[in-house]
């Protein structure tokens, strides 16, 4: 056993940004602790928490409000030096002290080079563990989404974490990663970014309320048309702004109008329901452009990407989001910002600006 704390999986290489974010957020809530990271490991541990502060921090950090962490798990046991011939017994012994009955078992590993080597072990050990847990009553006979999920995170063949997932405050995907498949007619892989953004940044109710057939959208920097194609498939009429060409599959939807124009200069004749943007530009310039559209009433909602610099990435994210939020408030707009580094993002984050 060890200091349990929190487990926060993230994109490999962004551990410092994830650690800086959770450390700063914990400080704002008056919770002490420290982040432990290893470059390219694909996760961050936040340690130095007693039971009260761990519970407090979990409540203060809903998974949807974290940018660089894909999920946030409350760890109650850490097992090291496991015998490869018998990993089951130590886990069952650790579970005996938890006093919980879990509704589901989620076998996980970091999304990094080392972690991916554990995928086979996660599958085989998960089968044995699921049966063992049900036999002693720590796992419901059938999956029950109303109960907490037991997350078993394999960090190595002899090292794992046991964590509890709140059914009302956890992503619905293993490891916080939605496994999306690229459609054969998608104009580009960037289509997956917008699909994931709609799943991660909006609830099902919000998608049904705000993403309706017949709405108007603008896609700035649209070529080759991946984001326009996603919106058109949802039934929206899209004006795609880019001097570059759009793929035939995008134009074939019949709902996309392509205008050869500068995305920083063009404006619509009437307000649109959605503004989306995935231009490769400085984050400050893109954030300012999005603010202009919203403040001047040219768009009601927006989803856009901010490309990040190589250094001081957390500081850049915080600065641009704080500046945009301040501008919207000063303009009297009651809008909320949500931001995440999606699984399909690279050196960037995706931001949604939505009504409250």
Image: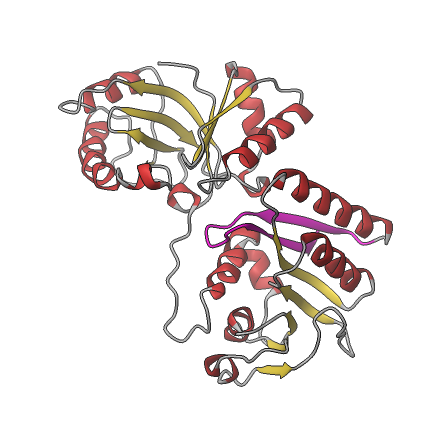
Q: Quadrant of residue 138?
A: top left
- Front in this rendered view, residue 304 or 132: 304
Q: Quadrant of residue 129?
A: top left
- Image check: 151 left or right of 128? right
- Name the residue located 54 percent from the left edge and 41 percent from the top edge: 68
- Front in this rendered view, residue 98 or 190: 190
- Name the residue located 54 percent from the left edge and 35 percent from the top edge: 18
Residue 200: where, in percent of width, then height?
Answer: 52, 51
Residue 173: where, in percent of width, then height?
Answer: 40, 47
- Name the residue located 61 percent from the left edge and 82 percent from the top edge: 258
Where 75 sits versus 323, above or below? above
Residue 20 visible in rendering: yes
Q: Quadrant of residue 255?
A: bottom right
Q: Is residue 345 magenta?
A: yes
Q: Quadrant of the N terminus?
A: top left
- Front in this rendered view, residue 352 or 349: 349
Residue 279: where, in percent of width, then height?
Answer: 62, 63
Q: Is residue 84 magenta?
A: no
Residue 106 visible in rendering: no
Looking at this rendering, what residue extends furthest in the left direction?
A: 85
- Name the residue located 25 percent from the left edge and 24 percent from the top edge: 158
Q: Which residues are magenta?
A: 333-356
């Amino acid at each position: 056993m060890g200091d349990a704390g929190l487990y926060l999986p993230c994109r490999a290489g962004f551990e410092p940004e994830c650690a800086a974010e959770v450390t700063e957020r914990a400080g704002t809530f008056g919770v002490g602790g420290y982040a432990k990271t290893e470059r390219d490991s694909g996760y961050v541990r936040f340690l130095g928490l007693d039971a009260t502060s761990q519970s407090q921090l979990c409540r203060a950090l809903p998974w949807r409000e974290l940018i660089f962490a894909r999920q946030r798990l409350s760890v109650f046991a850490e097992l090291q030096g496991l015998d490869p011939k018998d990993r089951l017994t130590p886990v069952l012994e650790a579970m005996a002290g938890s006093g919980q009955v879990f509704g589901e078992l989620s076998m996980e590993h970091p999304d990094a080079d080392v972690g991916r080597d554990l995928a086979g072990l996660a599958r085989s050990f998960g089968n044995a563990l699921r049966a063992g847990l049900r036999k002693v009553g720590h796992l419901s006979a059938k999956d029950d989404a109303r109960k907490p999920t037991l997350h078993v995170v394999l960090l190595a063949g002899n090292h794992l974490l046991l964590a509890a997932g709140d059914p009302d405050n956890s992503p619905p995907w293993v490891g916080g990663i939605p496994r999306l498949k690229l459609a054969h007619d998608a104009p580009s892989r960037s289509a997956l970014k917008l699909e994931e953004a709609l799943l991660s940044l909006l609830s099902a109710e919000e998608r049904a309320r705000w993403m309706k057939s017949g709405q108007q959208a603008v896609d700035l920097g649209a070529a080759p048309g991946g984001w326009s194609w996603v919106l058109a498939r949802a039934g929206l009429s899209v004006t795609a702004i880019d001097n570059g060409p759009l793929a035939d599959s995008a134009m074939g939807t019949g709902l996309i109008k392509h205008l050869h124009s500068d995305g920083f200069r063009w404006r619509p004749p009437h307000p649109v329901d959605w503004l989306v943007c995935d231009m490769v530009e400085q984050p400050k310039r893109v954030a300012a452009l999005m603010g202009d559209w919203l403040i001047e009433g040219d768009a009601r909602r927006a989803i856009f990407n901010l490309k990040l610099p190589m250094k001081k990435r957390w500081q850049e994210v915080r600065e641009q989001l704080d500046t945009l939020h301040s501008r919207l408030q000063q303009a009297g707009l009651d809008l909320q910002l949500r931001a995440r580094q999606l699984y399909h993002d690279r050196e960037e984050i995706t931001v949604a600006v939505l009504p409250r």
